[in-house]
């Protein structure tokens, strides 16, 4: 029951201008939105102002230059806190993971504008190289280190993988949320398996001084849709389209600014593409598979 609450609690928690750049037309703001001369920007999984400043300060500055409009950070308390903020018009642009996006779209009618396409964004489940576990079925009765609650690649998608393999993730295994610390927990034998996205796994191996020879991948999931920038639907369609166009036109500059910080290295080799809501139906299917589809 406690592990079932991990997913339930995640969902219930929804409850100056740059010089030389012509700003997007201020007349295209919706008059119902309190923002008239600046935009507020949030990142779904960057909790608190300190994390925003550290990990997205350079990106915010570049986005200001691209749009020609001052941009303020809007800190959030958890992964889904931007949903009510979007509903109330308190935040204008949010960078969201796939799992958060489908909630923002359902609950706040958020409009997807740009996806950050990642080519190796699929979940994997690993064990130690010397482990006798060779299949997901053999994880019954074992402890699995996962990412953060609500993480698409580190929690929701792997949970579906376990269910597809015939396991009850709430009774047959013990799930522990460890984030990126799971790689060391697995190495030390503190957990029997660990889940993460493939591209992030490669980055962590290098940063932790570990080798692929230390681990064995026993399962790989489907390619997942990528993180997406969404906008408040209270803004005028012409304004939203202008923002989308400018971000696409300045793809390289914006992506380079994201890659200046360690936390965003999984975006290496990515590109900005127009967002397509239908691409996220796979995430909606995950929610249905784990019995939470009615929340959407």
Image: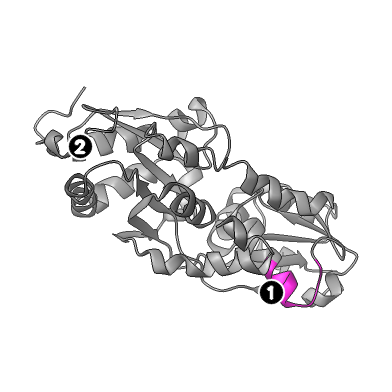
Secondary structure found at label 2: loop
Which residues are the magenta region? 160-168
Q: Nearer the viewer, residue 185 or 170?
A: 170
Measuring 47% from the left and 54% from the top, which residue is drawn there? 106
Q: Counting residues from the N terminus, which is met first, the one under dot 1 or under dot 2?
A: 2
Residue 105 lies, with reference to residue 280, above or below; the image says above
Side of 223 where 115 appears, left or right: left
**x, y (%) of residue 259?**
39, 46
**x, y (%) of residue 196?**
63, 59
Residue 118 lies, with reference to residue 185, above or below; the image says below
Residue 94 lies, with reference to residue 102, above or below; the image says above
Measuring 69% from the left and 52% from the top, which residue is drawn there? 7
- For the C terminus, give its image quadrant: bottom right
Q: Is residue 217 visible?
A: no
Q: Is residue 164 magenta?
A: yes
Q: Which colouring convention does the figure follow?
A: one colour
| Residue 38 in which image quadrant | top left
Secondary structure found at label 1: strand
Q: Which residue is mark 1?
A: 219
Q: Is residue 95 visible?
A: yes
Side of 281 where 111 appears, left or right: left
Measuring 40% from the left and 54% from the top, which residue is drawn there? 228
Q: Which residue is mark 2?
A: 29
Marks 1/2: CA–CA distance: 47 Å
Measuring 23% from the left and 51% from the top, which residue is drawn there? 244
**x, y (%) of residue 205?**
62, 56
Label 1 vs label 2, nearer the camera: 2
């Amino acid at each position: 029951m406690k592990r079932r609450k991990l997913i339930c609690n995640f969902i219930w928690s929804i409850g100056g201008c740059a010089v030389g750049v012509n700003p997007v037309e201020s007349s295209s703001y919706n008059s119902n939105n309190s923002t008239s001369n600046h935009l507020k920007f949030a990142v779904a999984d960057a909790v608190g102002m300190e994390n925003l400043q550290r990990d997205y300060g350079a990106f915010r500055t570049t986005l200001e230059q691209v749009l020609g409009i001052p941009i303020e950070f809007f800190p959030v308390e958890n992964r889904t806190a931007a949903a009510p903020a979007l509903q109330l018009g308190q935040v204008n642009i949010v960078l969201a993971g796939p799992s958060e996006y489908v909630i923002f779209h359902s609950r706040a009618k958020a409009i997807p504008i740009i996806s950050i396409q990642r080519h190796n964004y699929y979940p994997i489940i690993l064990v130690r190289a010397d482990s006798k576990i060779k299949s997901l079925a053999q994880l019954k009765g074992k402890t699995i280190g996962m990412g953060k609650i609500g993480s698409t690649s580190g929690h929701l998608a792997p949970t579906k993988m376990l269910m597809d393999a015939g396991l009850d993730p709430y009774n047959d295994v013990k799930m522990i949320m460890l984030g990126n610390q799971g790689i060391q927990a697995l190495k030390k034998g503190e957990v029997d398996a660990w889940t993460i996205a493939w591209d992030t796994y490669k980055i962590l191996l290098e940063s932790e001084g570990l080798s692929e020879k230390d681990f064995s991948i026993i399962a790989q999931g489907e390619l997942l849709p990528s993180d997406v920038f969404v906008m408040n639907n209270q803004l005028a369609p012409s304004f939203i389209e202008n923002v989308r166009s400018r971000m696409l036109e300045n793809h390289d500059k914006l992506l380079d600014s994201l890659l200046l910080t360690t936390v965003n290295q999984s975006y290496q080799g990515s590109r900005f593409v127009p967002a397509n809501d239908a691409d996220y139906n796979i995430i909606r299917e995950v929610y249905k598979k784990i019995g939470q589809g009615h929340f959407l």
